[in-house]
Image: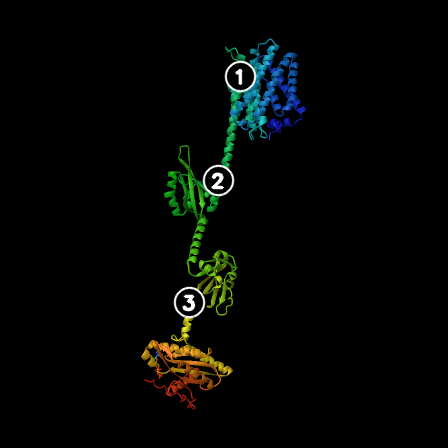
Amino acid sequence: MKPDRNTEQTRAASGHPVAQWPLGLAALGAAALYASLAFMGIEISRLPGSVATLWYANLAGAWALAHRPHRDWLLMLPLMMAANVAVNLALGDALLPALCFVPANLLETALAAWAVQRVTRWPELLRSPTLLAKALLLAGVAPALLGSVVGAALLACASEQDFAYLWPRWLEGGLIGGISLLPLVLVLLHRRDAPLLRPGRRLEAVSLLLLSAGVSLVVPLAVPYPFVYIALPLALIALRQGLALTAIANLMTSVLTGTQIGLGLLVAPPTTLHWQHVLFYLPILAVIVPPILLATAMEGYRHGLRELRASEQRFRNLYTHTPALLMSFLPDGRLVSASDLWLEKLGRQGPEVLQQPFTRFMPAVSAQRMHDVVLPTLRRTGVCQDEPCQWLTAQGELIEARLSAVWERDALGEPSRALAVIEDVTEQQRLALFAAEREFTEVTLHSIGDGVVACDPEGRVQYLNPVAAKLLGSPAEALRGRLFDEVIVLLDQDTQQRIDSPVQRCLREQRVSGLPSTALLKGAHGALHPIQDSVAPIFGREGRLMGAVMVFQDVREARAMAQRMAHLAHHDALTDLPNRVLLQDRIEQACEHSQRVGGQFGVMFLDLDHFKEVNDSLGHAAGDELLRTVARRLQTTLRQCDTICRLGGDEFVVLIGQVDSAQDLAAVADKVLAQVAQPCHVAGQTITVSISLGLALYPDDGSTVERLMKHADIAMYRAKRAGRNRYEFFSAPPAAPPGGEPSDAVSRPPPPA
Ligand SMILES: Nc1nc2c(ncn2[C@@H]2O[C@H](COP(=O)(O)OP(=O)(O)OP(=O)(O)O)[C@@H](O)[C@H]2O)c(=O)[nH]1
């Protein structure tokens, strides 16, 4: 966007009353100012000793114009020139010579105003001697040069005076006026809202101004070569005070000195040069220009100093308040600064740590390593990076850290101090340790053969190891976050009903809980896995319940083995028929049942006939085979509800349930005799065996297991004696003598040879 020209033009003077005055008032004010300075200049030039006009009016006019946009100049400039003519006429000049001054003054004023507007946009104008010198050339020297040429030429034409005589005098007056007043104009326009005088030094300012004025007034009257002395207070002002007071003092000096020259109080020393009068005024310039440049340099220096201090303060603030652990230490290790966070971290105050060796705040091992390894490396290479170290807080806590440092070097290249950054890695290390522990735990859980399922306090699955995931047929990620009971179905092997959630029970009771020994886990594709498990609560460090973990094993083989063992304990290994233990149990149950509900049952004692001969003739294995054949035949002949037991050897006992009479039992015995008598193939031969049976009936032949078995045995031996391959009922013996065994306890006959 193109800037508004008027705004641009008046930017330098914005905020100044002249910029805000109505145009008419501004033009009149400018004309009045111009007239008064012109009057003063013309009056001085007409003093007896004066050789030049001290012309301030054009620069003052330029100052007024610089506040206003260019269009306003169309009114202001003519009014100022009219004032110029009016003053000349009033002081006795004729109209033509008076008019001859106008073009030159008009040109000089407009040019100076234009240049002033431009140079006041330079940001460093009042802090750079170079820029100020350029500004003096552009807005002071150049307009005076041009104006003087035009003015001297016109005046030479209108009068009988020589151009060569007129021009240097005109130029001299314009230069002194311009260079004297221009710095003040630039200060006024450029300073914006800044105070004109340096704050807190007003008394000194007034004193120095009075001194300068006094020197300017007295010295020319008292000593030769007075300009050297006049320059001294100005230099002092330039050093001590700002540019503004120097500009004021300059202006005052030029006015006073010019007036003294005009009054003939300051006389030009004799010279051989033709332009002696001209050169006589030049010392004024030589006196005022160096102080103004010096003051500008001082402004630049002060500004630089302020910037440096501000920058240093910013750096200090950054250093002190930065959210990092920073410290600086001298080559001998003494601390010179520490950031707030460093102090806070160590629980220390600045005064107690500064000038102390920083290793004092480390445990002995770390301090030793600093002295032996880190500091020598730092001194040798100028830098150290991420050196592990430890710090001790005021409360005795240990901080794990890493230290990086770099030397700052002085002008001679010697290490002056080290700036160190400390990184607190306590938490980082704790997390790394935690991660390592966690990884170890995870690897362990992944490696063990048991299934592991961990839940949170709500019973939601948080972790499954691969064994558990494999059994359940789902990846751990798919099951994580779901309720344990949704994910894991536990059934009772016997009832096929769901088992109460052991996890919920554990979480509720906050103690280890287990599953019944018949628990089954429903796994992938409905497969049932016999498992045994235990669920333990997980407590955090503060004793807070954090969840529960179930560890389970697939006990298919162990449970099958247990079942086998249980079977073997109750069955005969050769025939797999129930053994004596089971038989006794069944007979006891039958006794109890019959006692409760009534009814009869039979006990049949069986013994193979001449079995020994089979063993002897065909071998023991053939005997075994024959026993298994007989067992099978008994199983196929008898009912499911009957219990067929092998007592051992060639003896079997059968519990025949639910018989109504002895005839029923006899019928069963007949069937058994018939079946056993069938020829059978043993050891490649066809043989025929027979069997002898003894029958006892509950309750007539006994109401206890022992008596029923004993009586059936007796009956069996009776059958043997009666010729074998037959059965005999137990004949009820006569009543037993008091206190003795019944007399039917016949002894077993010896087996046939
Ligand atoms: N093959 C085999 N033989 C057995 C086993 N247990 C016992 N025996 C034998 O079975 C035979 C039993 O004979 P007994 O019942 O006393 O006599 P027996 O030859 O059958 O004659 P009687 O019973 O009087 O008809 C003995 O020779 C035992 O050694 C077994 O488990 N297997």
Q: CA distance from mark 3 to mark 2?
A: 71 Å
Residue found at the far top of this picture:
160
| One can see residue 567 in this view | yes
Q: CA distance from mark 2 to mark 1?
A: 55 Å
Q: Secondary structure at mark 3?
A: helix
- Which residue in the protein does label 3 denote? 558
Compare residues 608 and 145 and report the one nearer the observer.
Answer: 608
Which is in the foreground here, disc 2 or disc 1? 2
Q: Residue at x 50, y 69 (%)?
A: 495
- Is ligand 1 within 8 Å of the beta carbon of the residue shown at mark 2? no
Looking at the picture, which amino acid does disc 3 mark? Ala
| Sequence-wise first label, 3 or 2 | 2
Q: Position of residue 353 (x, y in %)?
A: 45, 43
- Which residue in the protein does label 1 denote? 282
| One can see residue 396 in this view | no
Are the residues flagged by discs 1 and 3 in contact, CB closer than 8 Å?
no
- Which residue in the protein does label 2 denote? 319
Q: Position of residue 155 (x, y in %)?
A: 60, 12
